[in-house]
Image (spheres, rainbow, N blue to C red):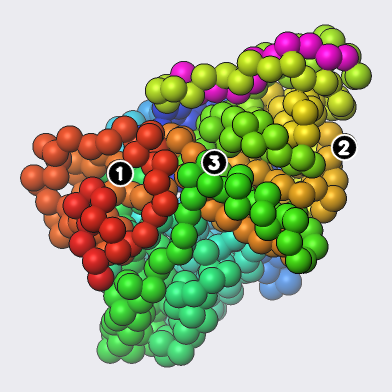
Amino acid sequence: MRVALAGFLHETNTFAPVPADLAAFRFGGGYVPMVRGAAMVAAFERVNLGMSGALRVAQELGWDTVPLLWAGAIPSAQVTRDAFEQIAGEIVQGLRAAGPLDGVFLDLHGAMVAEHLDDGEAELARRVRAVVGPDVPVAAALDLHGNISADFVSLVDVLVGFRTYPHVDMADTGAVAARLLHKMMTTGRRPAKAFRRMSYLVPIPFQTTDMAPARGLYAGLDAAGAQSTSLFMGFPAADIPDCGPSAVAFAATQAAADHAADTIAASYEAARAAFDNATYSAPEAVARAVALATGPGRGPVVIADTQDNPGAGGVSATTGMLRALIAADARNAAIGLIVDPQSARQAHAAGQGASARFRIGGHPGLPGDAPVDAEAVVETLSEGRLHATGPYYGGTRLDLGPSACLRIGGVRVVVTSRIAQMADREMFRFVGVRPEDQAILVVKSSTHFRADFAPVARAILVARAPGPMPFDPAELPFTRLRPGLRLSPCGPVFAALRATVARPDPGGLAAEVQYHHTDNQHGKSTC
């Protein structure tokens, strides 16, 4: 079977400050940097991405592969028109030049918004279909957080979403999609498909499949009785009509596909009241961590700085958690990553062991988030190249640029020049910080860190220090969602009237309260 393979991945936060240009895709930011043609085969060996699984299946089944292009960029604001058109254009041109094909495999995200397009995946699929025609099967592997549209589902023959968050099954998902593609190519039959939308958004940290209710929802997907089933939680920071959760099922008959999709949708709706957990302000999180660190158990207390998660459009530079650690005089604590090229350059100029005055981090777009002005010791220096071998990155090689570990009292700060989500223990080790030996670790991540940190953590806390990515989707200034979508499991329902209602600053001081679904903050009703 002759199969073309391509990838184009971006999770778009339409409220984020920085767009994804072509340079962002060339860099990757935790993804494999942009790669073309035959070089894709080597680039995806022993890496946890959908393309890796597809290429593995291609080798097993003896496909004649036509690798075209793979590009992925760290979540941010919209993909620029130039970047989208150049990448999509190169993929489409590659298909035109490929000659006769038996199938097409696409490694996508599902939540891409471009400056000129609400639905990047559907537009790419439309252009692919225009080249290969209606008879060549097209399969796609997608992220669990996809904001899936009916338009996109209609354009592909099968799609498969991740079933884990943290995403430790990305390569496995690509393999599943590739095997379904092979079945279509060899039998000539396409499965029936069914698509359902659900009614409420869930804060990103509560979507983790490490905890109920998401764990049970995903464990039950196969029981729905179809060839392939996917539950997409949706990426909530996207002000587009297709934002939100959905269920997709593929089966031998339309009745079976409809039954499976209805079963998944009903299970999701029934879980609404169960999506609940505690979060803390920055000072509360540090105080709780200090208390837990001196109690029974072993390993660090890990605090997720969820509102500055670069995996959701954060900048990985806000200082709320760092200030809280310093104010509490925390001992044996570490925080990372703080993306601050200026401080990294200053540390390298000063040299290892030097003491100097630094202005660390800070996000100018966030009111009150100034740099931390403090005397710090340069403990270690690094050029920023590391091999992230934990379950999430799965062997990806990162280049964070000139980096340093700065110590302020009992707090170590991992400062880098380039951005990536803190989701691997090696991202502390590369500057000499052994995460297992710390009492407290603060990570700029919402959930992916759990894959590598949970096995050594004494406890995990979710903090809502001020940041550009609000924990609660109800705090985002939406104007274009579909009417009737509930903005959190037990929160307000979006309607046209909400577009004119004043909102608190996203991630600002209003986030410095403990979150419970049963309160009446922002007009929330209880489940």
Of residues 297 and 180, the one nearer the viewer is 297
Q: Can see residue 497? A: yes
Q: Which tag, 3 or 2, sits closer to the chain's start?
A: 3
Is residue 362 found inside the magenta-colored segment of the image?
yes
Circle nearer the viewer, 3 or 2? 3
What label sits on residue 432 in the rendered view?
2
What label sits on residue 351 in the rendered view?
none
* 454 versus 405 height, above or below: below
Of residues 444 and 461, the one nearer the viewer is 461
Left or right of 101 in this view: 482: left
Q: CA distance from mark 3 to mark 2?
A: 27 Å
Find out whether the residues at labels 3 and 2 contact each other: C-beta distance under 8 Å.
Answer: no
Q: Can see residue 451? A: no
Bounds of the magenta segment: 354-364
Query: Residue flagged by tag 1: what amino acid is it?
Result: Glu
Is residue 49 found inside the magenta-colored segment of the image?
no
Which residue is tagged 3?
283
Q: Which tag, 1 or 3, sits closer to the chain's start?
A: 3
Q: State the residue at coordinates (36%, 50%).
A: 472
Location of residue 228 in the rendering, given as x and y in whole percent from the top left corner: 46, 79
What label sits on residue 475 in the rendered view?
1
Q: State the residue at coordinates (31%, 79%).
A: 270
Of residues 288 and 215, the one nearer the viewer is 288
Left or right of 31 in this view: 244: left
Locate residue 488: give its quadrant: bottom left
Query: Residue flagged by tag 3: what amino acid is it?
Result: Pro
Q: State the residue at coordinates (46%, 19%).
A: 364
Of residues 70 and 213, the one nearer the viewer is 213
Around disc 3, counting alpha carbons within 10 Å, would you say few (fewer than 14), some (14 to 19), or many (20 or more)? Answer: many
Query: Residue flagged by tag 2: what amino acid is it?
Result: Gly
Provide the secondary structure element on which disc 3 rests: helix
